[in-house]
Image (cartoon, rainbow, N blue to C red):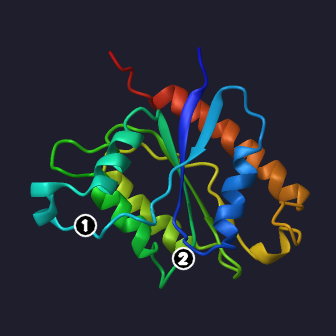
Amino acid sequence: MKPFKVALIVGSLRKESFNKKISKAISQLKVAGMHFESIAIGDLPLYNEDLEKDVPATWRYFRETLKPYDAVLFITPEYNRSVPGVLKNALDVGSRPYGESVWDNKPAAIISCTAGGLGAFGANHHLRQSLVFLNMPTLQQPEAYLSHAAKLFDASGELIDVSTRDFLQSFVEKFELWIERNIVKKS
């Protein structure tokens, strides 16, 4: 079986985002059955159903780009006990037009990451609510809440915390098994 193609979607736009650094660290992990690629969401115009009459090129590109992926790994910070607006907007853009969601049946996993102490717990669980509606079977265990993120990286942005690297390795290996069990075979 060829490796699963997994989209990495980061819910942070900040240049030095800890979530982007986690995404980079994940893409460097060695997992034979998975191939990770980052999908940018920062340039998507806000979802407005009126725009479906003349679909913005960025929406079209985003939707077409996501279609061939086998699964999605979301990496998100927490804003006001929820996901950042840019991530919610990407979910909305990808879920439309009605009946043509690019998210449907794609296995998913969530890593939430913050400089604070709660590991962006609220965002992680709020995102799960949306993924249920989008029909994305989402990995339940292990849960991934990364706290005190500023201590995890060196000055160049490389993940230096060994226990976090080991946890991420284990997490993506379990996600690979989740994908195997939940992927809908394409005909």
Question: Which one is in front, 132 or 69?
Answer: 69
99 relative position to 81: left or right: left
Say which mark, if any, is on residue 47.
Answer: 1
Rendered-image quadrant of the C terminus: top left
Question: Marks 2 and 1: in contact by CB < 8 Å?
Answer: no
User: Could you classify mark 2 by the number of other residues whose Cα lies within 10 Å: few (under 14), some (14-19), or many (20 or more)?
Assistant: many
- N-terminal of the pair, mark 1 or mark 2, is 1
Residue 115 placement (x, y as % from top left) = 71, 79
Q: Tell me what residue is drawn at x 88 percent, y 62 percent.
A: 161
Task: Please identify the residue farthest to the bottom as the structure is shown.
Answer: 80
What amino acid is at disc 2?
Glu
- Depicted 144 relative to depicted 81: above or below: above
What amino acid is at disc 1?
Tyr
Q: CA distance from mark 1 to mark 2?
A: 21 Å
Q: Quadrant of residue 118?
A: bottom right
Residue 163 placement (x, y as % from top left) = 87, 57
User: Could you classify mark 1 by the number of other residues whose Cα lies within 10 Å: few (under 14), some (14-19), or many (20 or more)?
Assistant: some
For mark 1, give the secondary structure: loop
Question: Which one is in front, 66 or 123?
Answer: 66
For mark 2, give the secondary structure: loop
Q: Is residue 56 visible?
A: yes
Say which mark, if any, is on residue 125.
Answer: none
Residue 157 placement (x, y as % from top left) = 81, 66
Q: Is residue 133 visible?
A: no
Residue 142 placement (x, y as % from top left) = 64, 50
Q: Tell me what residue is drawn at x 59 percent, y 14 percent.
A: 1
Q: Which residue is mark 2?
A: 78
Q: Tell me what residue is drawn at x 60 percent, y 75 percent.
A: 14
- Depicted 86 relative to depicted 24: above or below: below
